[in-house]
Image: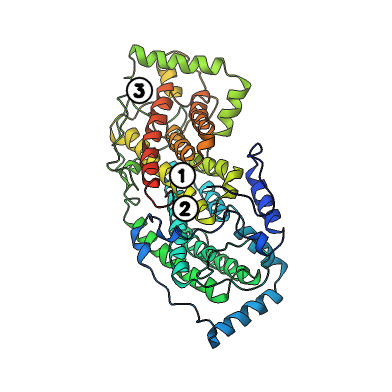
């Protein structure tokens, strides 16, 4: 599944870099030069157009044929491409490198994460957005590759200033990604200027032409294809139940969730467990067992366990709690996982279709895991209380405070643990050589919530189990999606 990088080999011993460094590495790799040695690092993907799409309707989209070889239209297209290369600006060079080098999903996921961080904390809405954007990007790539091998148009002659693949060039997969992601993000985040996203997508497309990687007709077709895919995803989003509104009714008393002391916070996304899911049907398929009832010996033992964990926290556990905290003003738990994977060097060695597939799998798994968690938190009627409330209400410590801020939704099961169990299993499947490491990181992320004092131990263990089971649905699909045969 992996191969050499565009400019030099990647050491298997040095896999981790910061997210900021990913962009720097991408620019550096793209600057290594053009020609045959600068082909896409993972080689050709002639079967990618036959892989299973997340929204089946995207597989029926068509485009007109590119200009016929030797025709006046083809000569005009080639002349326009040559003129764009000769007039290339430094800005276009920068854009082409930023959006053409692995991981190609980075700029669009970065934008989504930034917009998530600007809104009030809402984990299930964030994982919904990440899944829509990632799945749409994969479907755009699948559709582009299907048409590439239908028309089999060669890329422009000459050295491109960015890495290119040996696959046919019509339509441009990079333009299709830009068209789909920009339009979908504009729908999901209407507070952000849609015109700015549209302009950005067009800049990416023109930069590919100026870099010598595509003809104008390649990118025009790619943008059109991506935008049509975005339309199908927007139609799906409009009907997934996201706009349902909670009636405000909830159980009361110390045995149920209440806002943290001193707060009047309303619970976040009570109905998220009723939204449509990708693969998890019904949403309560992997429902966890009933949590310990407030005031019972088992419940009190769990409370004492949380107190003891905080008293004995090690510096490493504090560090982990802070790393995975994902509080307000951040990309939230699913976003942290995206950042971790974006900074994982073997991702850069995957072909564009496999990069898109990886992030679609990751984010679909986390979105469904989030839905499962929110269904258990609210729709069961459990509304399990948080440690800070119960430890004080039980009189175990009237002034007890957790290390981290307590979120405004019930404790059981842990959403971060659901997300993490799902992410760990997907990554273990895609990168089997590092399966043990990914599963360990999932446990680390889940346990960070116990270290932070915002969850009971059972929240973590059951959340991880649920997430792994949800990921199993995504892995089963992956084994049959055409990419592994």
Assign a secondary structure to mark 1.
Answer: helix
Residue 363: x, y in percent? Answer: 45, 46
254 shown above or below 202: above
- Front residue of 246/27: it is 27
| Front in this rendered view, residue 315 or 379 | 315
Residue drawn at x 34%, y 52% is 243
Q: Are marks 2 and 1 in contact (CB under 8 Å)?
A: yes
Left or right: residue 348 compared with residue 90? left
Q: Earlier in the sequence, mark 3 or mark 2?
A: 2
Observer able to see residue 343: no
Between the residue at mark 2 and the residue at mark 1, the CA separation in whole angstroms equals 9 Å
Q: Residue at x 65, y 42 (%)?
A: 18
**CA gap, disc 3 to disc 2?**
40 Å
For residue 275, side relative to residue 83 (left or right):
left
Crowd class of label 1 (few under 14; some 14 to 19; many from 20; radius 10 Å): many
Q: Please tell me the numbered disc located at residue 134.
A: 2
Q: Is residue 252 visible?
A: yes
> Which residue matches tag 1?
362
Position of residue 111 measured from the top left corner of the image (x, y, whole percent): 55, 54
Which is nearer the N-term, disc 3 or disc 1? 3
Residue 285 spot, x, y in % from top left: 28, 36
Q: Tag 2: Cα neighbours inside 10 Å, few (<14), some, or many (≥20)?
A: many
Tell me, for residue 254, which label it has, or none: 3
């Amino acid at each position: 599944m992996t191969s050499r990088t565009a400019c030099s080999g990647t050491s298997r011993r040095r896999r981790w870099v910061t997210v900021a460094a990913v962009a720097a590495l991408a620019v550096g790799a793209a600057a290594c030069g053009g020609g045959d040695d600068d082909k896409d690092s993972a080689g050709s993907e002639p079967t990618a157009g036959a892989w299973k799409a997340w929204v089946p309707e995207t597989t029926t989209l068509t485009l007109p044929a590119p200009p016929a070889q030797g025709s006046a239209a083809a000569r005009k297209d080639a002349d326009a491409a040559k003129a764009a290369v000769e007039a290339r600006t430094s800005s276009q060079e920068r854009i082409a490198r930023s959006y053409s080098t692995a991981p190609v999903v980075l700029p669009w996921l970065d934008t989504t994460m930034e917009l998530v961080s600007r809104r009030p904390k809402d984990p299930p809405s964030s994982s919904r957005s990440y899944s829509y954007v990632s799945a749409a990007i994969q479907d755009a790539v699948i559709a582009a590759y299907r048409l590439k091998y239908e028309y089999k148009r060669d890329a422009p002659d000459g050295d491109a200033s960015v890495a290119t693949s040996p696959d046919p060039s019509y339509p441009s997969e990079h333009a299709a990604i830009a068209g789909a992601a920009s339009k979908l993000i504009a729908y999901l985040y209407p507070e952000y200027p849609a015109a700015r996203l549209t302009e950005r997508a067009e800049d990416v497309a023109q930069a590919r032409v100026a870099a010598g990687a595509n003809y104008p007709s390649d990118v025009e077709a790619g943008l059109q294809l991506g935008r049509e895919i975005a339309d199908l995803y927007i139609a799906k989003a409009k009907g997934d139940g996201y706009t349902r509104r909670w009636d405000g009714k909830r159980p009361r008393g110390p045995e149920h969730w209440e806002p943290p002391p001193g707060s009047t916070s309303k619970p976040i996304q009570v109905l998220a467990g009723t939204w449509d899911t990708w693969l998890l049907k019904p949403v309560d398929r992997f429902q966890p067992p009933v949590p310990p009832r407030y005031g019972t010996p088992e419940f009190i033992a769990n409370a004492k366990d949380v107190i003891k964990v905080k008293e004995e926290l090690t510096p490493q556990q504090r560090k982990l709690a802070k790393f995975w905290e994902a509080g307000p003003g951040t990309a939230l738990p699913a976003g942290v996982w995206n950042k971790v994977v974006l900074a994982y060097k073997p991702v850069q060695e995957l072909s564009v279709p496999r990069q898109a597939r990886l992030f679609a799998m990751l984010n679909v798994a986390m979105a469904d895991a989030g839905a499962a968690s929110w269904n258990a938190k609210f729709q069961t009627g459990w509304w399990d209380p948080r440690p800070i409330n119960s430890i004080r209400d039980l009189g175990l410590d009237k002034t007890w405070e957790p290390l981290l801020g307590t979120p405004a939704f019930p404790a059981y099961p842990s959403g971060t643990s659901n997300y993490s169990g799902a992410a760990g299993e997907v990554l273990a499947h895609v990168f089997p050589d590092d399966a043990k490491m990914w599963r360990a990181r999932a446990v680390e992320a889940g346990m960070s919530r116990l270290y932070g004092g915002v969850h009971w131990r059972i929240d973590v263990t059951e959340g991880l189990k649920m997430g792994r089971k949800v990921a199993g649905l995504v892995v089963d699909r992956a084994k049959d999606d055409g990419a592994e045969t």
